Amino acid sequence: MKLTTRGRYAVTAILDVAMHSTRGPVSLAEVAERQRLSLSYLEQLFAPLRRHGLVRSSRGPGGGYRLNRDAAEITVADVILAVDEPVDVTRCGGLVNCNQDSRCLTHDLWVELSRQMQDFLRARSLADVLQRHLEARGEAPNAPAWQQEGRPSRRTIPITAAPAQAAGGGEV
């Protein structure tokens, strides 16, 4: 698999939204500035993320994006697949025509590696990735925030989907 910038940027951007949407919708301009990514490219990435139900948007002042489900329910594989990034390391794209229209010697090896990568990415939720990031920065306790019953930490960022919008807030 050659994970292109499209898949990498999509994961980075949706993680930024997950991390910062606790205070309200997150504008793509804010994500672009924090992550040093192109705003126009982010706009292209968020259209399929929205179509796949991973994020939702709201218009108007204070509008932006929020996760459509809890971060613990969205896997890295969901994000990568939503932006049309196949997880496949075979040269033939799984068509078994890698060696002049026949199976190459290493085809099965690469198919198995592709499966292992898919399993790895399916096993990692956005919440897992964010928790690990915060722990590495010394900003979160070892237990994820949602496992700390009644003990919210000042430095732990809750990583959940936003509640339904109040009346008058339009979803796009």
Image: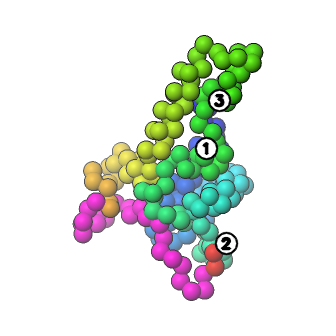
Q: CA distance from mark 1 to mark 3?
A: 20 Å
Q: Is residue 148 magenta?
A: yes
Quarter of the image containing the N terminus? top right
Q: Taking 59 as reference, is 35 above or below it?
A: above
Instruction: Classify mark 2: helix, strand or loop.
Output: loop
Instruction: Identify the residue under disc 1.
Output: 7
* 81 or 27: nearer the viewer: 81
Asked whether the viewer can see residue 46, the reply is: no
Instruction: Classify mark 3: helix, strand or loop.
Output: loop
User: Measured from the top left, where is residue 81 in percent x and y?
Assistant: 60, 46
Amino acid tagged 1: Gly
Instruction: Identify the residue under disc 2.
Output: 172
The boundaries of the magenta stretch are: 147-169
User: Measured from the top left, where is residue 57 in percent x and y?
Assistant: 62, 69
Instruction: Identify the residue under disc 3.
Output: 94
* 77 or 94: nearer the viewer: 94
Q: Residue at x 71, y 54 (%)?
A: 44
Local packing at callout 1 (Cα closer than 10 Å; few below 14, some 14-19, many 20+) is many
